[in-house]
Image (cartoon, rainbow, N blue to C red):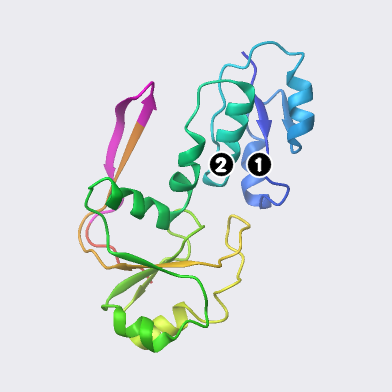
Amino acid sequence: MECIGFLSSKTVPAHLVSGVHDLLLVKLFDDKAELLRWLSGKGEVITVVTGFETAIEATDTLAAELGVAGNDLASSHTRRYKDAMQTALKDGGVRGIESRVVANEKEKLDEIATRSEFPCIVKPVSSAGSEGVRLVRSRGELSKALGRAVFGSINELGLVNDRFLLQSYVSGMEYVVDLVAFGGRYHVAAVGPVCEGLHEWR
């Protein structure tokens, strides 16, 4: 079995690309058309897997084009963006975190502050992990978290921060649950705490 790499974007940050070169890849492509031409004479493609969050949508599309099992294209957006994730939980009757999206730095800060309970969490919609996550305790901190220097900035994934999620602050232990989904069945692969004690985002 051979592994072939595909960079989902030509603007993938260097620190993410460097990890790709450590993999045992037969070939690495950054052009999908070229990849598909090369694969056309190489036999059966077994599967397409995502290497990082920014490639979720590209992975789903590529799997569909190659005719291999993959995630539903209709759910790509939901699995990639934090606001869509919270909406999906709510629509599915699963308890989530109260959230709202701020999509414009010109939105009236007074209105946002009035409708927000402090402390709250501010996070970029399109980033990953805990990058850009801020614990906001007051209107002043909210103003800094949603200021001009933030909107339009480039995050560690090489994407523009153009939307932010405001969420209620929830204290307590955070756990990560890793699942493997296949054929409509779900298997728990691992469960573990993120850290000991309470989070204190800065």
**Label 2 to label 1, Cα distance in Å?**
9 Å
Q: Are marks 2 and 1 in contact (CB under 8 Å)?
A: yes
Residue annotated with mark 1: 8
Q: Residue at x 73, y 20 (%)?
A: 39
Q: Amino acid at mark 1?
A: Ser
Give the image location of residue 166, x and y in percent.
37, 69
In which image quadrant can residue 114 be found?
bottom left
Judged left or right of residue 78, residue 136 is left
Label ID, residue 21: none
Pick the front one: 20 or 153: 153
Sequence-earlier tag: 2 or 1: 1
Q: Quadrant of the N terminus?
A: top right
Give the image location of residue 141, x and y in percent.
39, 83
**Callout 2: SS:** helix
Q: Residue at x 24, y 54 (%)?
A: 196
Pick the front one: 170 or 200: 170
Q: Residue at x 38, y 89 (%)?
A: 110
Residue 15 shown in magenta: no
Judged left or right of residue 89, residue 77 is right
In which image quadrant can residue 25 be found?
top right
Q: Which residues are magenta?
A: 180-196
